[in-house]
Image (cartoon, rainbow, N blue to C red):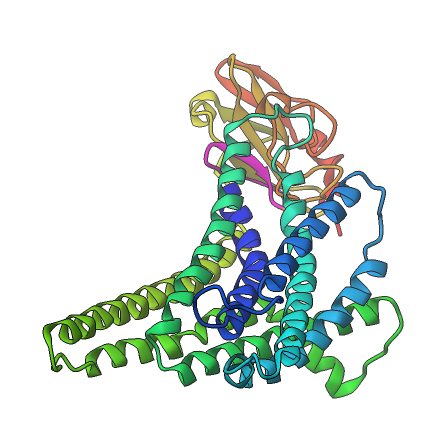
Amino acid sequence: MEMLGQFVQALPGMLAPALLAMTMSVLLTVGEGKDKPASRNWRLWGLLLGLLAAVVFAALRMLVIVDRRSGVNLPVLIGCVVCDVLMVPIACKASNLTANWHERPVRLHVANAIAALGIALTTFFALQDVIMQLTSFVEVGKSTFTSDMLLRALGWVLGILLAVACAAILRTMRTTAYHRSFLTACVLMLILLFVRHASQLLSLLMSMMLVVLHGTAFRALIIVSNNDLILVIAQVCVFVIPAVAAIVAGFREDFEGPNPAVRREHRAFRRRAFASGAWSLVVVIGIGVALTLGVSQVNKVPTLSPPEPYSLKAGVARIPFPEVDDGHLHRFAYTAKDGTKMRFIIIKKNGGAYGVGLDACETCGDAGYYERDGKIICKRCDVEMNVATIGFKGGCNPIPFDYTTGHGYITIHTSVLDALSSHFKD
């Protein structure tokens, strides 16, 4: 779960800059050879500058040198929105800008400058939180190098690599899909990016009390904000259009030609078209499924196991040792004298001792605990319990209470539970 959680956070954050850089690179690249405009590398420099700025800003946040990021993100998001608006017509006119660019080089320089600025700002804004995920690799009070830390790091790396691989695979369709189909996908991606940036800007303005929305505008903003993941997936799904077009182009390719060399060239194009279209469909479907199911799994609210039966007579509860000796979490229910529905848990710890406590803690209330992969987890804060400390006060540990062991039973007097019923009241 730790690995999946890092993966589904890193992948969406990296997709926007990766797709934007790929899109503008394909559309504004000028031919082959050495005869290229002076602005040919501006987009790459924009990507690197945005990455460096995100790393520096994230480091300042980690060191608590910067504790409020709204003052920085406000102008960044304004710049993102402006660049998004300008990049749509640039994408639509890219063919005119790159064809015979020597005649009007300034126009291509301006387009590359806007694209570079848009890539830099998008990268800076999107990668802040991705880099900040590094702070969650190691849990407080635990060793640096643990299996959980390595899983989190692996999920983070895989999310970033998949986003980069996605952009690289989609880029292969630039020479196989019909130009208009690839252009359509690029423009739709830019429009979706604009919608995301605009909604994030409005949300920030509202949180800073600089803008107040009411009625339809406010409801629309809430809908867009709550469905940001759908917009992320849609930015990838629009490339189904050129993927299908590439496959169609492959089927339409004619093997006939004036000589064997031309026929071989046609066959080679058909293979490239099928490969680029098929792999693009695979990556689009894969990312859609990974994010949909992954986020659903990460956000899934765990359910508590049902209470187990036990003996309750004359104000005394007794649980036989064999019923709780398997090292797993066991939950029991009790109704206090005041009518409060209570729960308590028992788990056998290493060394033969028992961890006994309420299914509640001082910090998170009566949310309860559940077992996941042999670990005891707080349902509300998702903190892993140290099983050895269950039965002791402090932190997110279950609230302990008095009990006795002997003659093959764990014995609990219900008067002890009655005195703790307030922990299960709203």
The image quarter containing residue 33 is bottom left
The residue sitting at 79% across, 43% down in the picture is 60
Q: Is 54 in the magenta?
A: no
The residue sitting at 26% across, 67% down in the picture is 272
Q: In the figure, is residue 37 to the left or right of 308?
A: right
The residue sitting at 64% across, 76% down in the picture is 111
Q: Is residue 311 above or below residue 283?
A: above
Which segment did they paint magenta?
367-379
> Residue 85 location in percent, x, y?
67, 80
For the stretch drawn in magenta, the main secondary structure is strand
Q: How many marks?
A: 0
Q: Nearer the viewer, residue 93 or 30?
A: 30
> Residue 16 location in percent, x, y?
57, 64
Q: Is 370 in the magenta?
A: yes
> Residue 235 location in percent, x, y?
51, 71
Q: Is residue 243 visible?
A: yes
Q: In the figure, is residue 78 to the left or right of 185?
A: right
Q: Is residue 364 above or below residue 277?
A: above
Q: Nearer the viewer, residue 91 or 61?
A: 91
> Residue 94 location in percent, x, y?
54, 81
- Taking the view exactly as shown, the residue that stands out farthest to the right is 209
